[in-house]
Image (cartoon, helix red, strand yellow):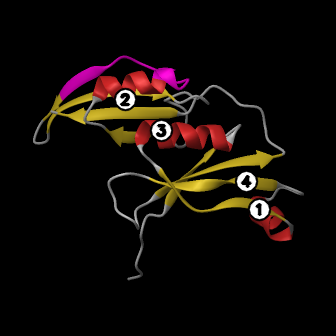
Amino acid sequence: MSKIRYAHVNIVAEDWRKLMDFYVDVFDCEPVSSERNHHGAWADGLTGLPEVRVSGQHLRVPGHGDNGPTIEIFTFDPQLANYERLIHRPGFGHIAFEVDDFEGVRQKVKERGGKDYGEKVTIDIPGAGRLTLLYMHDPEGNIVELQQWH
């Protein structure tokens, strides 16, 4: 059997630098590797978009060491208009972060342009424990889950 290792998830941003700064400041993600500025025949072929330019960078998520997975934040040129992200549409729904200061991180998300998506709930999960959850929007409307185990 071949070896498989999770690598990254991609977020397409209106402004990759601004969204990167949000994830660095709020969730302690760390920029890694070089900034990307992809274009040319190979980028056109890979994306299926003629004369596309893709710029951005990878952010290492906290808690997984130097070789942990990343969030890849890219901006495309040309780019489609943004749309409202809904939790129940098909496709990727959200990204989750486990936090130890739930209200502090929630407030930081709001201070940096995010907002609550739903209501904060606390549930008991048999065999796992008590968990507080909240879905929020980042500044570009992507859904982020905050979770805190008690």
Q: Which residue is mark 2?
A: 105
Mark 2 crowdedness (10 Å alpha carbons): few <14, some 14-19, many ≥20: some
The foreground one among 137 and 34 is 34
Sequence-first disc among 4 and 1: 1
Given the current orientation, which residue lies at the most extreme right position? 51
- Is mark 4 in CB contact (under 8 Å) with mark 1? yes
Tell me residue 141's x, y (percent). Answer: 58, 28
Q: Amino acid at mark 1?
A: His
What's the CA distance linking mark 2 and mark 1?
Answer: 33 Å
What's the CA distance linking mark 4 and mark 2?
Answer: 28 Å
Sequence-first disc among 4 and 2: 4
Marks 3, 1: nearer the viewer:
3
Secondary structure beneath label 1: strand
| Residue 150 shown left or right of residue 112 in the figure | left
- Is mark 2 in CB contact (under 8 Å) with mark 1? no
Range of residues picked out in magenta: 110-123
| Residue 83 shown left or right of residue 130 in the figure | right
Tell me residue 61's x, y (percent). Answer: 42, 52
What's the CA distance linking mark 3 and mark 1?
Answer: 26 Å
The label number, if any, that marks residue 55 in the structure image = 4
Q: Amino acid at mark 4?
A: Ser
Q: Which residue is mark 3?
A: 25
Residue at the image point whose x is 53% and y is 30% from the top: 138
What's the CA distance linking mark 3 and mark 2?
Answer: 10 Å
Marks 3, 4: nearer the viewer:
3
